[in-house]
Image: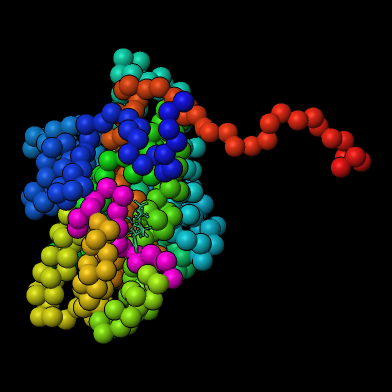
Amino acid sequence: MSEYLPGLAGVPATKSNISDIDGEKGILAYRGYPIEQLAKHSTFEETTQLLLDGDLPSAEQLAEFDRNLRHNRRVQYHILDLMKTFPATGHPMEMLQTAVASLGMFYPGNDCLTGGDACSDLNYIHNMTVKILARMGTIVAMWEHIRNGYEPPEPRDDLTYAENFLYMFTGREPDPMLARIMDVCLILHAEHTINASTFAVLVNASTLASPNSVIAAAIGALSGPLHGGANQKVVEMLKEIGSPEHAAAYVDEKLANKEVIWGMGHREYKTKDPRATILQKLVDQLMEARGGDINPMFETAKAVEAVCEERLAKKGVYANVDFYSGILYQEMGIPADQFTTIFAISRCAGWLAHWREQLKDNRIFRPTQVYTGHAARDYVPIDKR
Ligand code: COA
């Protein structure tokens, strides 16, 4: 039997050509394209198509895909009715998981999935990809209104994915700079090799479950604070610290108690996460555009990062993608408990790319275990125990 490695650390779980990480050098690339170039030149729609299809689309292909996404933003009123029955105090990630899973009841048809291109219905795969991706943003934005007791606005077909999301979420047309920042955030979070939620995609896809079940499983995995939930924790931590001069004492106390500093550390990166570098620059740009008028939390974050670098660099622990994203979302008027749902909207692009890749070369996941229980023994009747 092969060696048991907790957390499957370093164990290849699949072959994939979607994205790649060089954790020593701090490089992330989607389909070979460095994340810095995509963040600078691409859009979420184009990056999604790159992840799904393997290459940058032509102008016509992109226009067609974008049109499809825009036409699929509306959800049936039954889903709106269902969401109105959810408790307003529920966590938005639980809401998203439930609403996305429910889509499967409205769009059945996964019995066409047999694994392998030759027998699976490619139309179904394409249609479901667009339906789920387009509706994820709508559902998250709708929830912000429903949980506050209001009817959500209708999606708008004349806006990009990022613009429409911010429009629906806040009820106002977004400032162009904030819309572009949201677009970049969606690009940066869209894919990241075989992390916990993507592994959940592979396992569920391998059973030929419906794509709604596959994505709902991934949303559940992403909701945990060790994965996607960390960006909410970062903002809560920065609020608790309060100001830059309290950063060192806070970090030292946490480390002495063997607690984690949220937004620091990554299984793959032994240097600063390249996405954190891009996000930090975006905060800088926003600050410059606003003449320095930005949430003071940013200064606290920089102080925490500097202290962590002194204390944790020797362990290869640096800022990860979650460290600065929350500060930007706050500037857009997004409450902290909705940060992870935005991560999910974006990562849905990568999840769907992995779902499709798994189907093309499918074998059901069935790992083994190291049994540590009792040896065989006889049942004891209840009156003899
Ligand atoms: N704060 C303080 N110490 C940390 C740390 C953090 N955020 N992340 C890692 N370390 C320390 C560990 O305690 C360990 O120290 P030790 O060798 O003295 O025991 C060492 O660095 C190695 O970390 P390890 O727990 O083996 O890393 P991992 O790959 O198993 O875990 C994470 C990776 C992401 C789960 C972990 O870094 C973490 O919990 N980070 C905070 C949560 C977070 O921001 N998650 C979002 C990830 S994108």
Q: Which residues are magenta?
A: 257-273
Question: Residue 1 at x, y = what percent?
Answer: 46, 25
Left-right relation of 83 to 341: right
Query: Vertically, is 88 above or below 195?
Result: below
Q: Residue at x 40, y 22 (%)?
A: 363
Question: Quarter-wise, where is residue 264 in the image?
Answer: bottom left
Name the outermost residue toward the top: 118
* Ligand 1 image position (quadrant): bottom left
Query: Vertically, is 97 above or below 13?
Result: below
Q: What is the basis of the colouring in this image?
A: rainbow
Q: Residue at x 51, y 65 (%)?
A: 88
Left-right relation of 296 to 252: left
The tally of labels here is: 0
Q: Quadrant of the C terminus?
A: top right
Is residue 325 among what the camera can see? Answer: no
Query: Vertically, is 148 above or below 100?
Result: below
Q: Residue at x 47, y 55 (%)?
A: 95
Q: Residue at x 42, y 39 (%)?
A: 5
Question: Residue 224 at x, y = what percent?
Answer: 43, 55
Q: In this orientation, which residue lies closer to the viewer: 135 or 264?
A: 264
Magenta span contains residue 270:
yes
Q: In this orientation, which residue lies closer to the viewer: 219 or 265?
A: 265
Left-right relation of 131 to 296: right
Magenta span contains residue 57:
no
Question: Residue 369 at x, y = what percent?
Answer: 52, 32
Left-right relation of 352 to 188: right
Is residue 299 among what the camera can see? Answer: yes
Q: In this orientation, which residue lies closer to the viewer: 363 or 319?
A: 319
Question: Residue 212 at x, y = what percent?
Answer: 43, 38
Name the outermost residue toward the right: 383
Question: Quarter-wise, where is residue 281 in the image?
Answer: bottom left
Magenta span: predominant SS is loop
